[in-house]
């Protein structure tokens, strides 16, 4: 029996829990700008999307996920027989290297490009070459990772051309017309669609080439739940306008710091520099994880809150500017809801709430703003069954974040009280950051979930909450109540002591 030749293995970055332990930080304090993935999963990534797949998890999909392949074919105006599914585009990179360059040569465009091409060539026993014209297999990464540039497709390629379009949505390009000239196009659901954990990608090729690829794939390398998530994503219109705008905003902020990134057509920025690892290491104690390459630094674009924190930490490290307390990230996922909460105490009343339940999003916005908190809450739930699950979990998530952020509650004023009128309505709220969960509530008339929302908050935040709110208009009554709770909480959160406000010495 022959012994396999040792190969260089793909090296994954340190996991977030291991990194947090090494840095002495909480996992919620780590922000990763090293994976080129969005800050949030798509709204389509809901339990309902995978319910049918889970119900059939004991069986195979003998049609090879025909609905998903048909949806992809419709998106690119090709036939279903031209679509191959795989475990991310990486599966195809490895497979195509074995198919077209086993023992031969592989070229990449640009030459400084995605590292997986090198690993695939190694697995195929192929040699990397700079001579694109003579290579058996040519990968053109457009937009290119890690630089973000949009390279031209070279002329005179005699080998198999593969267009890797992992970031194509950000650039507004589609290489499918090149299929008629023999090219293979690769796409992934990991980036713009936000499904990196699902591991779904696809290849588009001529019918004959797609048949060759199918014949060499393992049967059903994509799982049923992953295919269901991909189908939900691809059948929902994709809009990356906001992400591109955020990329350009961050690029301008970096340029103002004399860290000038290259023009990018992807969801990341590349900054040429000497010794980028040194800057990566300097940012790690802040919980900011960037990625160094031989020729520069790559920064993934997340969202405004996370990106602002990254920029603030850069200014603190490079220019000694003061650093405000950081947001901490909390997530809650159930069979009915998926929620992400970022909370900073003390804050400046900067609040963004978007769960899809407009009225109670507004109520939480009022509470956080009047409480002087910085809060960003995003997510979605099964509103088709009513608002109960989503509202309850939203306020439970906020309560859990508040509880963990307050910690031992040392030095806080602890007690707060407020009265708030709202036209004919009047609300009175008293808060005790007691560490004991108790809610005594009288909200009349209640628009439906106001009292339950505040009770959910009190339970998970471990606070004592007394609220009385009355009036004629249910909206006015609820809004007055949430504002009063926020203003009472603002008083209770004032920090002026160094001890716990209790004769017991702890709450």
Image: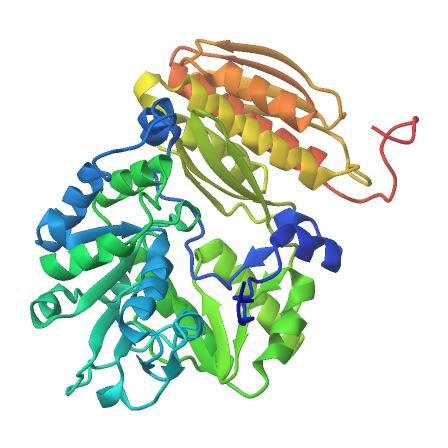
Q: Nearer the viewer, residue 461 or 481?
A: 461
- How many numbered markers are drawn? 0
Residue 121 appears left or right of 325: left
Percent position (x, y) of residue 463? 69, 24
Q: Residue at x 12, y 66 (%)?
A: 179
In the rendered image, the quadrant that contains the N terminus is bottom right
- In the rendered image, the residue lying farthest to the bottom is 131
Percent position (x, y) of residue 368? 54, 37
Q: Nearer the viewer, residue 374 or 138?
A: 138
Relative vertical location of residue 176 with respect to residue 295 in this rendering, above or below: above
Q: Residue at x 15, y 61 (%)?
A: 209
Relative vertical location of residue 477 with respect to residue 206 in this rendering, above or below: above
Percent position (x, y) of residue 304? 44, 57
Give residue 167's quadrant in the image.
bottom left
Give residue 42's quadrant in the image.
top left
Residue 206 shows in the view: no
Q: Nearer the viewer, residue 328 or 93?
A: 93
Residue 126 appears left or right of 394: left
């Amino acid at each position: 029996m022959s012994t396999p030749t040792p190969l260089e293995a793909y090296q994954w970055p340190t996991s977030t829990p291991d990194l947090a332990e090494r840095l002495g930080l909480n996992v919620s304090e780590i922000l990763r700008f090293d994976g080129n993935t969005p800050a949030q999963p798509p709204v389509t990534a809901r339990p309902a999307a995978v319910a049918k797949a889970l119900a059939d998890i004991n069986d195979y999909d003998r049609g090879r996920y025909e609905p998903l392949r048909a949806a992809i074919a419709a998106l690119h105006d090709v036939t279903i027989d031209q679509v191959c599914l795989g475990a991310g585009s990486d599966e195809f990179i490895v497979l195509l290297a074995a198919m077209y360059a086993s023992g031969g040569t592989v070229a990449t465009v640009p030459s400084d490009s995605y590292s997986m091409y090198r690993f695939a060539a190694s697995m195929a026993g192929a040699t990397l070459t700079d001579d694109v014209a003579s290579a058996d297999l040519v990968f053109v990464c457009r937009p290119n990772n890690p630089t973000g540039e949009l390279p031209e497709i070279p002329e005179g390629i005699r080998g198999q051309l593969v267009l890797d379009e992992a970031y194509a949505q950000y650039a507004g390009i589609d290489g499918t017309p090149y299929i008629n000239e023999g090219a293979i196009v690769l796409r992934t659901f990991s980036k713009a669609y936000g499904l990196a954990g699902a591991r779904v990608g696809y290849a588009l090729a001529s019918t004959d080439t797609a048949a060759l690829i199918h014949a060499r794939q393992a049967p059903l390398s994509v799982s049923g739940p992953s295919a269901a998530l991909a189908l939900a994503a691809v059948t929902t219109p994709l809009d990356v306008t906001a992400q591109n705008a955020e990329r350009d905003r961050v690029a301008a902020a970096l340029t103002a710091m004399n860290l000038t990134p290259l023009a990018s057509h992807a969801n990341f920025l590349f900054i040429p520099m000497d010794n980028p690892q040194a800057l990566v290491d300097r940012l790690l104690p802040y919980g900011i994880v960037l990625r160094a390459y031989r020729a520069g630094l790559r920064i993934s674009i997340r969202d405004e809150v996370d990106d602002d924190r990254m920029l603030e930490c850069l200014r603190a490290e490079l220019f000694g500017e003061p650093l405000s307390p950081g947001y901490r990230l909390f997530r809650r996922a159930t069979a009915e809801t998926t929620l992400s909460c970022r909370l900073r105490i003390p804050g400046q009343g900067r609040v963004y709430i978007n769960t899809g339940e407009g009225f109670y999003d507004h109520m939480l916005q009022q509470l956080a703003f009047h409480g002087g908190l910085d809060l960003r809450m995003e997510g979605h739930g099964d509103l088709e069954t009513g608002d109960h699950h989503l509202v309850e979990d939203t306020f439970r998530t906020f309560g859990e974040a508040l509880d963990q952020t307050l910690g031992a509650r040392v030095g806080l004023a602890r007690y707060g009280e407020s009265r708030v009128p709202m036209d004919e309505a009047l609300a009175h709220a008293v808060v005790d950051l007691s560490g004991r969960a108790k809610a005594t509530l009288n909200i009349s008339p209640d628009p439906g979930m106001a009292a339950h929302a505040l009770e959910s908050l009190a339970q998970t935040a471990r606070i004592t909450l007394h609220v009385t709110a009355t009036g004629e208009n249910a909206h006015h009554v609820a809004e007055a109540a949430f504002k009063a709770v926020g203003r009472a909480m603002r008083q209770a959160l004032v920090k002026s002591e160094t001890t716990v406000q209790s004769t017991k010495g702890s709450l």
